[in-house]
Image (cartoon, rainbow, N blue to C red):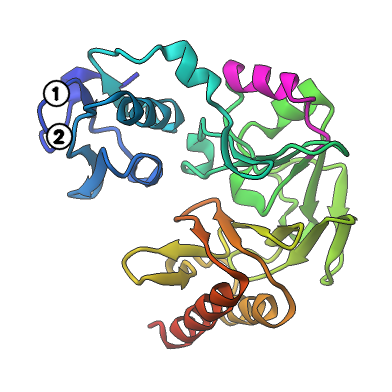
């Protein structure tokens, strides 16, 4: 829990607050945009919750904050009900895990609930309320990593659930440690009839994305939405491998695949028709080619 002694002066008066340990990961701002905004390089409260829905969103952001930088001096919404809301439904059988980890700089992770075996995309914190919900939902068959940065507590999830970890060999670093399924090719890897792993080198050499049912693209740090630019984009300032390769990877997505959701580790989600998504990718690629 955040320390009220370090409460930022940028917060409006009221029970909820952000303290000065905030790392500006953006989690709270996209989880509860009606409550949080960015001010002077960190998050802050600009509107105190005034109803149960707003308070629930604020508490979900509080529990998801990777550095425990959000606090409250008074809660009316039952904490048990808020904890029970994780993982949070996005669409169909795809859920947002919450409980972001500082080890992954606050990256989002996702959960696909499917009869053939559940899949955890990138790793959240090994938080007991989340672990119990995963148990209730049937455990975890696969723990898929988009890349080496967002593995967080994967060892604990692997040991607890016996989940098979999946990563590209180019990102199987000492930081990751081990994986049961290692992708070695530069061509798409079919994990199941509805699950396709697509290599997209750029952010890292071994970065991949997961396409589920030709509807959901779990994009890691390859692709996200920018409210400022008002279109999809990539993170050039944190492209650790090769920017031209990332542009080429983006063109591969444009010309060869269709989807309706972009679900990133960092950055904002985006949902649109497949036709609009194509237009957004075209804008993204055009911006990437011109980016200084």
Magenta: main secondary structure equals helix
Find out whether residue 132 is within the magenta segment.
Answer: yes
Residue corresponding to mark 2 = 11
Quadrant for the N terminus, please.
top left
Q: Is residue 26 above or below residue 126?
A: below
Marks 1 and 2, Cα distance to the nearest angstrom? 8 Å
x, y percent for residue 96: 57, 39
Q: Quadrant of residue 9?
A: top left
* For discs 1 and 2, the disc positioned in front in the rendered view: 1
x, y percent for residue 146: 67, 54
Q: Is residue 127 above or below residue 247?
A: above
Q: Residue shown at 69%/34% (left/top)?
A: 154
Quadrant for the C terminus, please.
bottom left
Q: Quadrant of residue 27?
A: top left
Q: Residue shown at 82%/33% (left/top)?
A: 163
Q: Is residue 45 above or below residue 214?
A: above
Secondary structure under tag 1 reads: loop
- Give the class, few, some or many, for how many residues have Cα within 10 Å of label 1's Cα (few <14, many ≥20): few
Q: Quadrant of residue 121?
A: top right
Residue corresponding to mark 1 = 14
* Nearer to us in this view, 231 or 56: 56
Secondary structure under tag 2 reads: loop
Q: Is 292 left or right of 148, judged from the image as shown?
A: left
- Give the class, few, some or many, for how many residues have Cα within 10 Å of label 2's Cα (few <14, many ≥20): many
Range drawn in magenta: 128-142
Q: Is residue 215 above or below residue 102?
A: below
Q: Residue shown at 88%/39% (left/top)?
A: 116
* Nearer to us in this view, 64 or 171: 64
Q: Residue shown at 44%/33% (left/top)?
A: 66
């Amino acid at each position: 829990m955040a320390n009220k002694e370090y409460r930022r002066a940028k917060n409006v008066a009221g029970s909820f607050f952000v303290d000065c340990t905030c790392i500006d990961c953006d989690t709270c701002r996209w989880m509860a945009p009606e409550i949080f905004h960015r001010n002077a390089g960190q998050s802050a409260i600009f509107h105190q919750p005034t109803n149960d829905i707003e308070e629930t969103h604020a508490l979900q952001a509080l529990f998801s904050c990777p550095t425990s930088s959000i606090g409250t001096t008074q809660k009316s919404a039952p904490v048990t009900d808020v904890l029970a809301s994780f993982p949070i439904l996005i669409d169909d059988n795809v859920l947002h895990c919450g409980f972001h980890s500082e080890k992954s700089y606050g990256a989002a992770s996702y959960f696909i609930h499917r009869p053939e075996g559940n899949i955890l995309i990138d790793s959240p914190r090994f938080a007991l309320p989340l672990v119990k919900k995963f148990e209730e939902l049937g455990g975890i068959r696969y723990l898929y990593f988009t890349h080496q940065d967002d593995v967080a507590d994967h060892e604990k999830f692997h040991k607890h659930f016996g989940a098979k970890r999946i990563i590209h060999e180019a990102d199987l670093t000492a930081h990751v440690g081990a994986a049961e399924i290692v992708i070695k090719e530069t061509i798409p890897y079919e994990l199941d009839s509805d699950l396709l792993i697509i290599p997209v080198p750029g952010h890292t050499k071994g970065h991949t994305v997961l396409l589920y049912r030709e509807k959901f693209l779990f994009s890691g740090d390859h692709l996200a939405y920018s409210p400022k630019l008002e279109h999809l984009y990539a993170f050039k300032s944190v492209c650790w491998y090769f920017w031209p390769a990332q542009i080429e990877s983006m063109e591969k997505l444009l010309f060869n695949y269709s989807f309706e959701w972009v679900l990133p580790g960092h950055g904002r989600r985006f949902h649109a028709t497949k036709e609009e998504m194509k237009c957004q990718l075209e804008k993204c690629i055009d911006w990437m080619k011109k980016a200084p």
